Amino acid sequence: MLTWHCQTFNELSNNNLYNLLKLRSDVFVVEQNCIFPDLDNLDTLPDTRHLFALQDNKLVAYARLLAKGDSYLGYTSIGRVVVAKKSRKDKIGHTLMAHAIEETLKLWPDSPIKIGAQSHLEGFYQSHGFITVSEPYMEDGIEHYLMTRETEVSL
């Protein structure tokens, strides 16, 4: 069974902070062979929330929720969306994204959401109500699209 947590930086235990940073590094830096500044000073902002799921006390999924304007002017944002490699067969990515959208809209109900999505995940995000709003662009050596989601979406 998954247990979900949504915490500020200061609420994170040392173990949870270490585990979420390790998961991000394992996937985004090592698995995707991408050198980028993961520690970008957004994790510690007072309004940032760290959404994560534990299964048998092990971190299996994570997303970072950013307040309006912290990443994109006029938008909240969901980023660093990641599922542990061993848990991907369980298809919890959709559950993670649904929780991330729900928590973001609960925290900031009047703000649409903008994300920078890796292009191979465009369809995944579209299935959660996001619309592609840019041409493809390169970020850290990986093709991305900007995508937005309004506060009310019928799926």
Image (cartoon, rainbow, N blue to C red):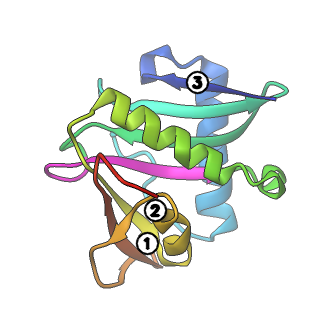
Residue 18 is one of the magenta-drawn residues: no
Please tell me how crowded label 1 is: few (under 14), some (14-19), or many (20+) other residues with Cα within 10 Å: few
Q: Is residue 80 magenta?
A: yes
Q: Is residue 93 above or below residue 105?
A: below
Q: Residue at x 28, y 53 (%)?
A: 150
Q: CA distance from mark 3 to mark 1?
A: 29 Å
Which percent across, then down, holds residue 139? 39, 73
In front here: 71 or 39? 71
Callout 1 touching callout 2 (CB < 8 Å): yes
Q: Residues within 10 Å of mark 3 (few under 14, many from 20)?
A: few
Q: Looking at the image, is mark 3 or mark 2 nearer the viewer?
A: 3
What's the residue type where badge 1 is placed?
A: Asp
The residue tagged 3 is 5
Kindly indicate the quadrant of the structure image that contains residue 115: bottom left
**Identity of the amino acid at label 3?**
His
| Stretch in magenta | 71-82
Can residue 44 be seen in the rendering of this structure?
A: no
> Which residue does the numbered mark 2 point to in the structure image?
36
User: Where residue 96 appears, x then y in whole percent?
Assistant: 60, 44
* Residue under numbered circle 1: 140
Dot 3 or dot 2, earlier in sequence: 3
Q: Position of residue 136 (x, y in %)?
A: 36, 84
Quarter occupied by the N terminus? top right
Q: CA distance from mark 3 to mark 2?
A: 26 Å
User: Disc 3 or 1, which lies upstream in sequence?
Assistant: 3
Q: Secondary structure at mark 3?
A: strand
Q: Percent x, y for residue 83? A: 68, 50
Q: For the point 30% across and 84% down, which residue is it?
A: 135
Indicate the amino acid at tag 2. Answer: Phe
Q: Is residue 21 visible?
A: yes
